[in-house]
Image (cartoon, grey):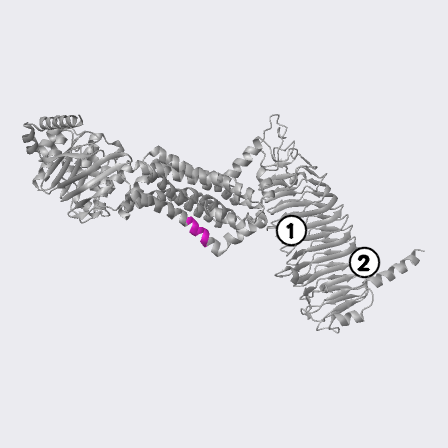
Amino acid sequence: MTRVLKYILYDILRTRFILLYTAFLFISTFGLYQLDSDAGKVVLSLLNIVLMVVPLVSIVFSTIHFFNSYEFIELMLAQPVKRSTVFLGEYMGVACSLCAAFVTGVGVPMLLFGINANALTMLYTGVTLTLVFVSLAFLSSVLTRDKAKAIGIALLFWLYFSLIYDGLLLWVVYSFSDYPLEKITLVLIAFNPVDLARIIMLLQLDISALMGFTGAFYQEFFGSYLGMVLSTLVLFIWIVLPIALAQRIFNRKDL
Amino acid sequence: MKKLLVIPFLCTCLISFGTAIPVGSTHAVKTIKQAIEKASHGDTLIIYPGVYREGNIVLEKRLTIIGKDYPVVDGENKYEIFTIHADHVTVSGLKFINTGVASINDLAAIKVLESNDLRVQNNKFENTFFGIYFANSTNCRVEGNELKSDAESEHQIGNGIHLWKCEHMTLDNNRISGHRDGIYFEFVTESLITNNYSEGNMRYGLHFMFSHNDEYRNNTFINNGAGVAVMYTKGVKMIGNTFEHNWGPSAYGLLLKDIRDSFVTGNIFKKNSVGIFMEGSSRIDFKENTFSENGYAVRLQASCDDNVFERNNFSANTFDLVTNGTLVLNTINHNYWDHYEGYDLNHDAVGDVPYRPVSLYGMVIEHMPSAVLLWRSFFVFLMDRAEKAVPAITPDNLKDNSPAMNPYDFHKAN
Amino acid sequence: MISIKQIDKKFGKLTALENVSLELQTGKSYALVGPNGSGKTTLIKSILGLVIPTSGDILFSEKSIRHDWKYRDKIGYMPQIGHYPENMSIGQLFDMMKNIRGENQRSDEELIDAFKLYKMYDKRMHALSGGTRQKVSAALAFLFPAPVYILDEPTAGLDPISTEILKEKIIHERRMNKLLMITSHILSDLEELTSSMVYMFEGKVHFNNTIEQLKHETNEVKLSKALTTFIRQKELVASVSEV
């Protein structure tokens, strides 16, 4: 496993894209810190990058990379190597390099301008979202043999979790606004990793107080030990489930 | 003739300065009670360092009580310490600790009943139920006191400085923390609250009811349970105060309820859940205030009318303005909004297109609190953008027609 | 060595392999021939476990290859088109393959030397010509001595000298009593390299015997002639049976 992983990782880190991505994150973060002296506001601006750009880049890059490495995967599978080793190796390789790019691009400016709990939570959610969306990318990659189609599915995943799901959620809240919705919405939030990451981040930023009584309820939940464990667990499921499903499909797939 | 006039004047002097009675373990008079008994009107008691445990001390003579190096007067968690019923009394330089706690009587470190022209200066209060308590008094000054308590819940503690039915009072330069309300005013008129610092009180930093024609200036209210409440009052001037970090599901920087004909000028509202929450209030001038980093800068209930918001700075608030109605009878003009994205073609520092401070999402949350979960999501961003481009739901007439392009610099103007 | 038992492979509606059964024995070299799309590559990939048959089974040394991966240790495979991590240099690629196979396995670098690939060890894969890639693929296939070699279009795109080098290598391995399976459209090469022939058409095996037998049956001296005659005969039979 480590042998395969080593080479996959090496290969991805050499592609210009990862370097560009790192540079983009670095410049954005650095620029935000330069423009705004208030570290709290910088983290809020970064939140948009983490919630929008990181998932998009992760899912699209991973899908493209998977198809670009198709022949390499084929070569590997002709060797005495397990399928799951190759597949999970690819996953780990892509996920690790994207995470490394994120942590470097965002983390280094943070270190330069002063790291705090908010910044650490930001790194944590960013890394988690990266892992989730790489996982989803691998799922969309094994669902079809066609690269363009797979990128289409990947983009659909992204659009769904970033936009469509929230629209549906608002519709649900609107339709049932006469009922107490706190617990239901809490469950619904768990079905969208982007929302979950966003809320963990917002509560960390101490802005939850303005959310009124509803907000207090969520803060109580996410602020508690159980809530933290549960939300981390749910995010973990979001990482593991798609990649496990993708692995099952891949094991039966023809190359 | 002149000599004849001088004699009564000298007499008055003798009376008011009187004799000085030293009190302390090394002096002839050991206790404050003894000293009060011995003293006559106009005498001065000089209390030397030590701990005085004398239960409730009742003072009904016109005395000046001065502590040297903060002698400690201890209420042993049982008693009210000073009960004063006399005019022209001065209490200064004492340290009051451990008053009794009672749910029926308002036990205080210093309680003043129906007296005029008192001075309470430079005292320290620690762990007192009520700190300084005035009822039915006029023309008193409370200055430079420091009140500290560390209660854990609201009902275990009284107010720091509590005034009821008073007139012409001055509260200046006091520091109050850890009480129920930092400063409490009920039926107090024509009074002045200046340069006080009220921090970390359980309920309100300042609680203010039925107190007409008062003025409070340059005070700081930080991190109080529910901020500052001003209610059922007319003719209040609130000038140059700082309302900061009143954070919580039901906390406000400033709560205005049924206020009329008042001024809110030059204040700073920073990092509050809600900068100003107002209902049933009218004819208030909001000018040159700074609202920054609040959840809501202003929550204007539909029951408010004829208020004017002019030349205020709004920056880095989540929501600048939220209202629960559609009909708006208030004037909003010439403010600076950092969310403003208009342009200024003729370079007169006034934006050429109106600013709408109420966002669609702000309205949505008013009606569906659960929607708060979507805050800062891409969906909400697009929703607000769409509404800004084609306003359909947000109140049409709620807008600033001449928004300032740059923030006002109030410090320079002062 | 390898027995293919009645395998079928369908890609959706398309049938790629239909009831294919073959016994491939050690020491023999097989030419896998057939028109484009006849299922040759699918068959090879099935043996390698890259394609999973819809039904039927493949045994390698009497063991089913389904759920097994270690048997691939015993196969040297040269794909039709070799695609490699674009940013890797040739040297790294070889290192990687050795690394993945395990340190203790001895490697056969004869082809690397013969193709003078060591001179280009620093060249990155994306900078390689089609021919050089083909050389790399060939060198990789023979990098580890194995009892079975499967070569998909080994000489396509190679210059004449390299083709000769590769052919010599294949002949050399054949003499070592290995099982060889080669697809090619260059029949003259196959004639030199192989002794048996499997002819596939539309997913079915139509001929499976020695080349000598084919020549004998068709009464031809050259393999190319023999094959065309064989196909004509087949077509004739087919048209007759259709009528």
- Where's the N terminus of chain B, which quadrant? bottom right
The x and y percentages for residue B130 are 70, 61
Give the letter of the chain under mark 2: B
Q: Which residues are magenta?
A: A229-235
Image mark count: 2
Toward which corner of the image does residue B125 lie, by quadrant?
bottom right
Q: Secondary structure at mark 2?
A: loop
Q: Is residue C115 visible?
A: no
Q: Secondary structure at mark 1?
A: loop
Of labels 1 and 2, earlier in sequence is 2
The x and y percentages for residue A209 are 57, 49
Q: Residue furthest front?
A: C243
- Left or right placement of residue A89 versus residue C121 in this view: right
C83 or B12: nearer the viewer: C83
Amino acid bearing label 1: Gly
Residue at the image point whose x is 78% and y is 56% from the top: B165
Amino acid bearing label 2: Asn
Instruction: Assess disc 2: are there few (<14), some (14-19) or many (≥20) residues with their C-alpha within 10 Å of its C-alpha.
Output: many
Label 1 and label 2: CA atoms lie apart by: 31 Å
B405 or C31: nearer the viewer: C31
Answer yes or no: do the residues labelled 1 and 2 have beta carbons within 8 Å?
A: no
Toward which corner of the image does residue B403 lie, by quadrant?
top right
Instruction: Assess disc 1: are there few (<14), some (14-19) or many (≥20) residues with their C-alpha within 10 Å of its C-alpha.
Output: many
The x and y percentages for residue B216 are 72, 48
> Which residue is labeled 1 in the image?
B227
Toward which corner of the image does residue C225 lie, by quadrant?
top left
- Where's the C terminus of chain B, which quadrant? top right
The x and y percentages for residue B244 are 62, 48
A17 or A51: nearer the viewer: A51
> Which residue is labeled 2 in the image?
B116
